[in-house]
Image (cartoon, rainbow, N blue to C red):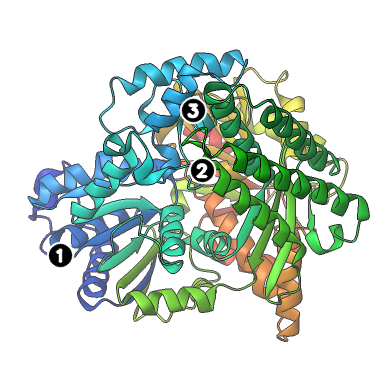
Amino acid sequence: MKQLFSDNGPIARHFQGYQPRQPQIDMAVHVENAIAERATCVVEAETGTGKTFAYLAPALKSNKKIIISTGSKALQEQLFHRDLPELVKALNAGRKVALLKGRANYLCLYRLSQHVSHVPTDDPDVMHQLAMVAKFATETNNGDLADCVGIEEDAKVLPYVNSTADNCLGKECPDFQECYIRKARLRAMDADLVVINHHLFFADMAVKDSGFAELMPTADSYIFDEAHQLPEIACDYFGESFSTKQLQELITDIRVVYRADIPDMLQLGKTLNKLETAVADFRLVFPLEGAKGDWRNVLKEKYICDAIHRVISDLAFLYQVLKTCLDRSDKIEPLFERTLSLKGKLERVFDINETGYSYWYEVGRRTVQIHITPLNVATKFAELVEKTQAGFIFTSATLSVNGELNHFSDSLGLKPKYQLLLESPFDYKTQALLCLPRYLPEINDDLMPHAIVKMAKEVIAASKGRCFMLFTSYRMMHLVYEGLSERIPYPVFMQGQSSKRIILEQFVRHGNAVLLGTASFWEGVDVRGDALSCVIIDKIPFTSPDDPLLQARMQDCEKQGKDPFASIQIPQAVIALKQGVGRLIRDRNDTGVLILCDNRLVTRPYGQVFLKSLPNMTRTRDITAAIKFLENIN
């Protein structure tokens, strides 16, 4: 490894301007050892370390089957389409590589043909997008919908043209031989190195656990980039959930078959309409969109239980009607099975007595989701690691809290043989200034939005736009947007106006814009160079205290005799804040100002834990010093 990364090695010869970095070499050696020994390795590699090549090079040079898992589809595609091909060339590595995504990312030819021949909606957006996907189907080789121009991640057409585990017909599908998911999995089976994402990893483990066929191949070693996301994702997959969206999709799918194959079964049409009304009524018993709460408390309300029982009753009747249709169409049987499965899932939401789990719900614009989430996944994840007998490597720029990796390792039950904390090679002292402005109101003061707008106007004028503003709530983001959008001479973009990708492209293209975002913009956003020179964060990103899952975890922590604030809330918030701060300096030539608008960083004892966990920037409490720094950049 040392030779590969040396100043006369193959990487230096291939990549112009490459310079050896000792932290990168140290990480590559640790990863190489973990792969060879099938050991567990945890590495925090701060921005600029070169961690991507530090795990890709040992993976390519080994003779083992390696699966690399990322936290986002954007990084997954960057690895596969940009980093891996270049490194394969540099190392002259004759290794087969494959990209494998979850099934929802691939075009389902059967569902496309169903919906093109019988469009189940009058929505003009869906009609237009369906035509775009139909054209894409004639051109694509891999069926990856990310390659379909004009179809964003949240496009309305997606539920009509991709498949779910519920509605996939498997070998019974008339298009099975041409199935893009099947072909992608076959390529993955044949490859030496497969790039997946965390959700697919856990979905696969859940399927294997249930005794069904695997979605992806078994590997000798697993490498997780953006590993800080794993504890939360693991909770989702080790638990259970039910969504009214599943019922809505079932109704849509049955309606397509009803209209195309058995239009004379009028009773089926009426039964679907009745169930659809019952599902909509169930959503309406929860008045607030975005609300979350304790499901155990909700079940004490008779009117909510009555609404669920009406849905169950209508599902049971639909099941009986479908039974009479089985001999009318061969497409009915899988829908018949789904109806029974969803009825069983919905009946299980009344079973709330198992300890060690949080029972909670969340309300979307048109849906209600009910979750049964384990409070601790350490034991289950440790069992998974033990069972696979594979090497496990975890890396991210943000794993440590107060200079230690214990919080991350404990959350997944890891006992790593190798641990490493690698500092960034960036000169934060000269490249960046951290400002904690004096005289701001307390964070919950009604005057806080006004104070942030007033300060931001001065700062944005000094930086000539080129600013990210990151918020912990939609409410604060909208209030600041209203205060800024008409009062500064620069383009202002806000999360929700378009897809994340389009907003970022617009931000970079303008070169002097301001972007306001919440959670999804705190990580996985890489803006280098002149387009960004200032990041403003409204407050410490503590999870909302009324979050039902957090409340359940804190109660469980108290029962164990620990301090839930110190054990749960602070570590989670430190890692989230480090992610937001990491948006500012992405390159050796980047310079900029970070402004944290939360007085608690200096007025509360725990503020020191946060500040010690951040890069070692020059600090000031004087906003005029921040303004001068920005003016000097220009």
> Where is 568 relative to 307, above or below?
below
Whether residue 127 is visible, yes or no, is yes
Q: Are marks 1 and 3 in contact (CB under 8 Å)?
A: no
- Residue type at numbered disc 1: Ser
- Residue type at numbered disc 2: Glu
SS type, badge 2: helix
**Disc 1 packing (10 Å; few <14; some 14–19; many ≥20):** some
Q: Label 2 belongs to which residue?
A: 333
**Disc 2 packing (10 Å; few <14; some 14–19; many ≥20):** some
Return the x and y of residue 469 as percentages of the image width and height. 63, 38
Q: Nearer the viewer, residue 473 or 307?
A: 307
Q: From the image, which quarter does the N terminus lie in?
A: bottom left
> Where is 487 relative to 330, above or below?
above
Q: Is residue 277 left or right of residue 169?
A: right
Return the x and y of residue 268 as percentages of the image width and height. 67, 31
**Disc 3 packing (10 Å; few <14; some 14–19; many ≥20):** some
- Measured Cα–Cα span from mark 1 to mark 2: 47 Å
Q: Nearer the viewer, residue 312 or 571?
A: 312
Residue depth check, mark 1 versus mark 2: number of the one nearer the observer:
2
The residue lying furthest to the bottom in this view is: 561
Q: Label 3 belongs to which residue?
A: 152
SS type, badge 1: loop
Q: Is residue 545 left or right of residue 176?
A: right
- Residue type at numbered disc 3: Glu
Label whose residue precedes the other's in the sequence (1 or 2): 1
Q: Label 1 belongs to which residue?
A: 62
**Residue for point 62% across, 15% down:** 122
Return the x and y of residue 155 as percentages of the image width and height. 53, 27
- Measured Cα–Cα span from mark 3 to mark 2: 32 Å
> Where is 125 relative to 54, above or below?
above
Whether residue 540 is visible, yes or no, is no
